[in-house]
Structures are given as C-alpha cells and as structure tokens.
Image: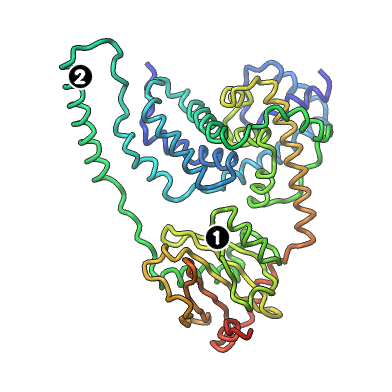
Amino acid sequence: MKVAPDFEQLVDAHYAALYRFGLSLTRNESEASDLTQQTFYLWATKGHQLRDGAQAKSWLFTTLYREFLGSRKKQERFPHAELDDIAEEVCAETPPPPEDFDTTALMEAMARLSPVFRAPLTLFYLQDFSYRQIADVLEIPPGTVMSRLARGKAELRRLLLEQEKQNASRLVPLPSLAAAGKKHE
Amino acid sequence: MNRDEAKAILRVHRPGHHEHNDPELARALEFARQDPELAQWWAKENAFDTSVAEKLSHVPPPADLRERILANPAVGSEKPSAATRQQPWWRGFSALAAALAIFATGAFFVWNHQPPAIPPPTLAEWQSGSIETLTHILAGADKLDVESPDSSKLRQWLQQVDAPSPAALPNSLTHLDTAGCKTIAIGNQRVSIICFHTGPRQLAHLVTVEERSLSNPPPEHQPQYVRHGEWVTASWSDRGQSFMLAMKGTDAELKGLLSPAA
C-alpha cells in the first residue's frame, strides 16, 4: 500500500525547489514565497486526497504553476500564442556556451527569457524532472516541451554571452576593492 | 537517426537523469558512442547544463519560508474531506462540534509549537553586522552581488529584488562612481550595501535598512558618529529608512562626505 507523505517531510523535500520555480516565473521574491505557501496550503487542504506519495512532487509543481497562471490571468495574457513568433527569432544553431558566469548573471538571463521558455527550463534544471514530467506539470505535449527546451537553452546561452560582453566593458574589477580595503590597514 | 536528430533528443536529457526505458534516447546514446564529434558536443552540453543546475540550486529561499509554511493553520486540518452522502441534521451538529474541537486543539498545538519570532536587530547589531560583511568584502572573502559604476542602476536592481533601496542619497554621493552593491540579512531583516569610490583606492559604503526593521533606529536627519575599530560610521534615519555611511578613515573625512557643502 502506498503511503501519503508526512506534511513536514514533504515541505522539507520540495519547498526550496518550489520557491525557485516560483521565483523564475514571477521574478519577485515575495510573490514566489506567496506562491510556495499557497501551494502547500492547497496540499494541506486538498492534497491528502492524493494517496500516492510518488505523485506528490508533480502535484505540487503543477499546482504552483496553475496558481501562477491564475494570478496572472487578470494582469496579462500568458503569451502561449506568441511562441511561433519567438521561435522564428531564435537562432537555429545553438550558440557556444559562455566560458564563465555566476548565479547573479544566470538569474538575470533567466529573468530576461520569455516565460514560455523560462518555465520548462527551470523545471529541467531543477534536477529531477524529465521532459515528460515537465509536459505533465505544464500541461502541454511532450514534443512542445522538447522544442521549448531546445530553444530556451539556445536563448539562455545567447543572453549569457551578451551579458558577458556587456560586463567586460562596464565592470569594476574586484582587485581594486581589495586594494582600497588595504589602504588603511 | 542522423546527428541532428540525435542532438535534438540528447539536448532534453539531463546527465544522470535518463529515462532508461526510452528507446529513442537509447539510440541517440548509442549514436553518440560511435560519433566522436557528437560525443564531444554532448560533453559540452552536459557541462553547461550541470553548471546551470548547480548555480540555480544556490538560490536560497527566504530564511523563514519553511517556518511560515509549517505555521499555516491549515496544516492541522490535513484530514480527508467529509463524506458527501446525506446525514441526519444532528450529525451535522456533532460534526461541527468535533471540527471545532479539532480546530481548537490544532490551533493550540500550532500556537504552542511556533518557533519564537526573531526580534528585530538593534542599531548596534545592524552596524556591527554590516561592518563584518564590509570587512569580508574588502578582504576578498565575500563578493558583491552586482557591480556597476552607476548608482542609479544599483538602486534599480535593489528595487527589483525587493531589497531596501535608498530613496535619496546624500548630496556628496550622488555624483560618485559606485563599485557595486550587495544584499544581506541581519536578524531576519534585509539590508543593502552600496559601495562608492570616494577617491583613488578609497571607498565609502552606504548601508540601508527599512527604519521599522530596527528596534532602535538612529534619529532622523541627525547622523550619529560611531567608530568600530578602523571603521568610522555615521547613522541616521530619513523618510522611513535608516542609513549608515561607513568608511575606513578619519571622522573628519566622513563628516566631509556628509557636510551640506560636499
């Protein structure tokens, strides 16, 4: 018999990844926190009906995504219909990966991605989701996930490379900071 | 299957997270084993994916998010829903009474098991915590979150990440180039730091926090000067925010930065 997961264990296992998914969707820390809390609230009030603990993770991510779409419905139309136009703009050939980038650069690049790419890409990089599971969470066909992942990864690389070039011209190198700190030592 | 088709399949699989019963993936992997160019391409693809996944996993959730989720009263009501069949009216009352009893017990449990709230930091804790971070940054043991010579861009970025962004800068700082900024948490409160170049090899750092986040914020418009070892600091509040300007230098240098004529 499959056992429903203990609530606290479920929170410990998934709240950080859910928060990161929420953050990638909303690009706002407080909204991401609210979505994560709302998702677990819904689990606490409805999720017990799901007796198979193995499906809990998928249920949580699907619920967070639905909540996000619901919250955006009144503000803007989620641009599913624009995907074909975006696809035309993305280079057919994947650009080479950037040599080096930090978490801040990555988050900035992710934030600049179109939401249609950002959602599947975040789930892809949250480690355990296969493209078929991503299709379940986002409720789109697996073939669509495959093409969005491919295009999203190409676009992410392009944005990271673009940032790398911009930063090279405007960044103040850290050694100057260290030097300034030593002045009075 | 050709090379491009194999790439299309491999591209959507994370290294180490393969679906072993996927025949198309098995064929693509076999193709990669026999095609050195494809194998090299996939190795680079894997390296990029691993790097992105690793960096994404470093984004920390808010420190109190777990506690907030667990403190939700709905957690105590994690029970199957009532049967939908028709019941006698008196059963409804007993069910309601039972529900109230369960709720009261749950609420009492949650009330008594909530983690103690973290008190807001004092002015001294905020100052010393910020100085500690600044010391780490200058020693190269910690990094700025964002680097830019433009203070308006840094303030904009701080707003985007919901960190305290100074509503106004002291006159003397408005025309200075910046090195960058960083956000930290002190006693569960978000604090931001902007580093300014005040001269060759010299920096001053503006630390900002919401005034309500401190248990005893500094006075309005009246900078309080305090020395912390080699650091000299001036702290004041203005329009709902508290500020600390800190630098390694003399009191006179710092006062010069805050004088209206500067």
Q: Earlier in the sequence, mark 2 or mark 1?
A: 2
Work out which quarter of the rendered image holds the N terminus of chain B and state it: top right
Q: Position of residue A150 (x, y in %)?
A: 74, 31
Q: Position of residue A65 (x, y in %)?
A: 54, 31
Q: Residue at coordinates 63% horizontally, 32% vertically from top-left?
A: A77
Is A6 or A33 nearer to us in this picture? Answer: A33
Q: Position of residue A79 (x, y in %)?
A: 67, 31
Q: Coloring scheme of the render?
A: rainbow
Q: What mark, if any, has residue B41 been given in the picture?
A: none
Q: Which residue is mark 1?
A: B183
Kindly report which numbered mark, 2 or 1, lies closer to the viewer in this rendering.
2
Is B246 or A103 nearer to us in this picture? Answer: B246
Q: How many marks?
A: 2
Is residue A101 shown left or right of residue B127?
right
Q: Which residue is mark 2?
A: B92
Is residue A140 shown left or right of residue B240?
right
In which chain is the residue bearing label 1? B
Q: Residue at coordinates 44% horizontally, 66% vertically from top-left?
A: B211
Mark 1, secondary structure of its residue: strand
Q: Residue at coordinates 76% horizontally, 62% vertically from top-left?
A: A170
In which chain is the residue bearing label 2? B
Work out which quarter of the rendered image holds the C terminus of chain B and state it: bottom right
Up/down of B10 relative to B158, above or below: above
Name the residue type under label 1: Thr
Q: Residue furthest top?
A: B86
Q: Residue furthest front?
A: A74
- Give the Cα distance between marks 2 and 1: 54 Å
Q: Residue at coordinates 40% horizontally, 25% vertically from top-left?
A: A47
Give the crowd class for mark 2: few <14, some 14-19, many >=20 residues within 10 Å: few
Up/down of B1 relative to B36, above or below: above
